[in-house]
Image (cartoon, rainbow, N blue to C red):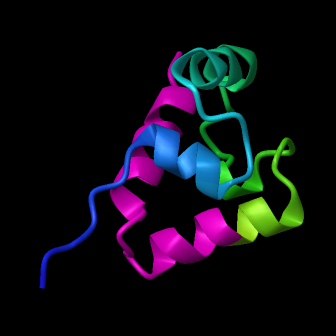
Amino acid sequence: MESSIHTLNNLFEQLGLPSDDMAIENFIKTHRHLATNLSLSEAPFWSPAQATFLCEEIIKDADWAEVIDQLNTRLHAK
């Protein structure tokens, strides 16, 4: 079975957020520099449904996990 390859654009669509490249870059610029002790799903800008999705997909190591990790890295960048 071949696993799905998701992009940041797909992830933002899944989260119900604007998903064009400029919107994603603006989101990252606005929300980067998350505290190192704060997991991505605990960030205050997510809705409860978005936070649950992010947390569950990482725990399950689902198809979305790789792109969620990419977003996590970009939002925790110093």
Q: Is residue 51 visible?
A: yes
Relative to 62, residue 22 above or below: above
Q: Main secondary structure of the magenta part?
A: helix
Extreme-left residue of the structure: 1
Taking 24 as reference, is 6 left or right? left
Magenta stretch containing residue 73, yes or no? yes
Relative to 77, residue 50 above or below: below
Quadrant assignment for the N terminus? bottom left
The percent coordinates of residue 72 (x first, y second) are 51, 42
Magenta stretch containing residue 66, yes or no? yes
Looking at the rendering, which quadrant does residue 63 occupy? Answer: bottom left
Q: Is residue 76 visible?
A: no
Taking 48 as reference, is 75 left or right? left
Q: Exactly how many numbered labels are in the figure?
A: 0
The percent coordinates of residue 23 (x first, y second) are 66, 21
Q: Residue at x 74, y 51 (%)?
A: 16
The percent coordinates of residue 5 (x first, y second) are 27, 57
Which range of residues does the magenta coloring cover? Answer: 53-78
Q: Nearer the viewer, residue 14 or 33?
A: 14
Looking at the rendering, which quadrant does residue 19 occupy? Answer: top right
Q: Residue at x 38, y 44 (%)?
A: 7
The percent coordinates of residue 44 (x first, y second) are 86, 45
Relative to 12, residue 18 above or below: above
Taking 42 as reference, is 78 left or right? left
Q: Residue at x 50, y 22 (%)?
A: 77
Q: Nearer the viewer, residue 59 or 49?
A: 49
